[in-house]
Image (cartoon, rainbow, N blue to C red):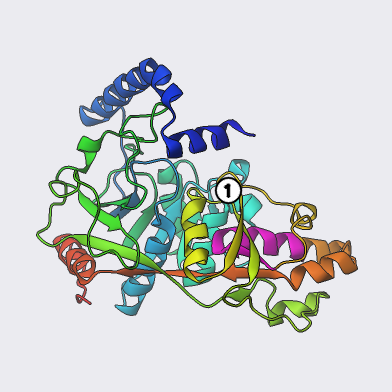
Amino acid sequence: MSIETTMTRAWQRQAIWLWLLLPISWLYALLMLLRHQAYKIGVFASYRAPIPVMVIGNITVGGSGKTPLIIALVRHLQQQGIKVGVISRGYGGDSSQMPALVMPDSLPSVVGDEPCLIVNMTGAAMAVCPNRQQAITTLLETYPDLQLIIADDGLQHYALQRAIEWIVVDAARGFGNKQLLPTGFLREPMSRLKGANVIYHQKTDASSVNNDESDSNSSVTERLTMHLQPDDLELLWSSSDQTDGLVIVNAVAPEKGNQVHAVSGIGYPQRFFDTLNSLDLNVIPHSYPDHYDFSLAELLQYSEHPIIVTSKDAVKIRALLVQATINQTLNDEYEELVNRLWVLPVTAVLSDSCYEQLAQQLQAVNIAINSK
């Protein structure tokens, strides 16, 4: 078991032994404070882009629903006629090939899985690089007419100045023991939420956020909320892919009561498993570390039942299948596998107050937009 998996499970169950790491958390807090102050007083230089930058991030380690939120925002802005681009550090990609533009045919192994998903879902202009300034420069060199840049993550990347900042909080997951890394899974203290624009990611049927600390943290009168709405299951290997030699034969989507393998390499896999359970599927969960690099041989072990994966994992698995068909390494066993691979897409549904807040913030930086 990897260290990441061990820590994630310990945070989830709030293991007692985590408190032994408290001195390390104190050191982390001190270094973080010194770093933040260094940027604030100008000891470390920060970059201001020539157009407004909107940062979408979180204060916790692990998934919070940030990527679906970005996809929803990009689509909304595109519908409003706003020319929007996206940048990311490209986690899981090859930093030696960055900065790089993300294209529809880009490989997750080069630019990262989340950037591939964002571009495939929105067609937005996007660049990746650990150095956000280089990512923005690369993006604007190719797309000089952009009006707004959304930064995927980067909340703690103070080398990048931002005009707008949204913090996503998973209301169902909460803040664990409310301690900084590594005792807890907070990247920044709870005080970071005070006066911030906080988007509370809650369950579809939740009428309110079950968190006592949250009420005083939002800077708007009406709470900003979102939830993830599951869409219909889709075959991972689509009909347009069948020209590459793999043919889908009589594939039937899993139905209520069916047993399925749920395979997930995302930051908080339990949310994925819970969603499948809510669809009345009999779930056999298989969790892997975030951004995990699957192999086709690894997936073969999940036999007999359909396999359901997240959209983020699907982009990597699809790339593996494409490469395998090019190399002509697939036998009947793999043909059978692709007939069992399904994807559960989700759509972020934002409250009206989110769109109203967005319109106000963009107007403040001279970008006109209609509220939803």
220 or 163: nearer the eye?
220
Residue type of the residue flagged with mark 1: His
Determine which residue is flagged by label 1.
291
Quarter placement of the C terminus: bottom left
Q: Quadrant of residue 337?
A: bottom right
Identify whether 14 is placed above or below 362. above
Identify whether 170 is placed above or below 370. above
Query: For the point 17% across and 69% down, which residue is it?
Result: 356
Residue 205 percent coordinates (x, y): 32, 68
* Residue 316 is a magenta residue: yes
Quarter placement of the N terminus: top right
Magenta stretch, residue numbers: 306-322
Residue 103 percent coordinates (x, y): 57, 64
Please tell me whether the stretch drawn in magenta is mainly helix, strand or loop: helix
Could one spot residue 76 in this view of the protein? Answer: yes
Left or right, 297 with reference to 361? right
* Residue 25 is a magenta residue: no
Residue 102 percent coordinates (x, y): 55, 60
Identify whether 2 is placed above or below 281. above
Question: Could you classify mark 1 by the number of other residues whose Cα lies within 10 Å: few (under 14), some (14-19), or many (20 or more)?
Answer: many
Left or right, 268 with reference to 45? right
> Among all residues in the image, which is located at the extreme top?
23
